[in-house]
Amino acid sequence: MQMNLTGHHVEITQPLRDYVQDKIGRIERHYDNVTSAHVILSIEKLDQKAEATVHVAGGDIHAYATEADMYAAIDVLADKLDRQIKKYKEKLTDHHRSDKVRSFT
C-alpha cells in the first residue's frame, strides 16, 4: 500500500511517520485490495486532528478523528478505518445464496 502523509501546522517527525504507517498499515490485514492511503495530520487551536482517505478497489473510505493528543487521534482514526474496512468487505460478499430454493407453502 502506498501511503502519503501530510502535516498542516505540524512537523512530521520520523517516529510520528512510523507510528502512522504501523497503525494505518494494519487495515491491510482485513482487506487486501487497498491501493493507497492519504493521511493528513493537523493542529487547529488546541485540537489535534488526523484524517485519512483510503482508496480501495471500487471506492474510497474517509475518516477523521480529533483528540487532545496526536497519537490518540491516530489511534481513534485507525480504529474507525478498521471498522469501515470490515463493513465494506462484508458488503462485497454475498450473504444470500442464489441457488437455494425456498418454498412458501
Image (cartoon, rainbow, N blue to C red):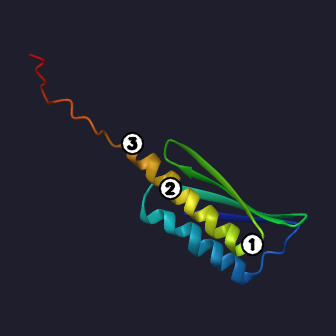
Q: Amino acid at mark 3?
A: Leu
The numbered mark, 3 or 2, whose residue comes first in the sequence reads 2
Furthest-right residue in this view: 45
Horizontally, residue 18 falls left or right of residue 84, namely right
Horizontally, residue 48 falls left or right of residue 73, namely right
Q: Amino acid at mark 1?
A: Met
Furthest-bottom residue in this view: 15
Marking on residue 70: 1
Q: How far apart are the two marked residues, 3 and 2, measured between alpha carbons?
A: 15 Å
Q: Residue at x 75, y 73 (%)?
A: 69
Image height of 65 relative to 92, above or below: below
The numbered mark, 1 or 3, whose residue comes first in the sequence reads 1
Q: How far apart are the two marked residues, 1 and 3, measured between alpha carbons?
A: 33 Å
**What kind of element bears circle 3?**
helix
Front position in the image: 35 or 61: 61
Image height of 99 relative to 27, above or below: above
The residue where tag 2 is placed is 83
**What kind of element bears circle 1?**
helix
Marking on residue 96: none
Q: Nearer the viewer, mark 1 or mark 3?
A: 1
- Classify mark 3: residues with Cα within 10 Å, few (<14), some (14-19) or many (20+): few
Horizontally, residue 10 falls left or right of residue 15, namely right
x and y, in percent, of residue 2 in the image: 59, 63
Q: How far apart are the two marked residues, 2 and 1, measured between alpha carbons?
A: 20 Å
- Classify mark 1: residues with Cα within 10 Å, few (<14), some (14-19) or many (20+): some
Quarter of image, res 64 = bottom right
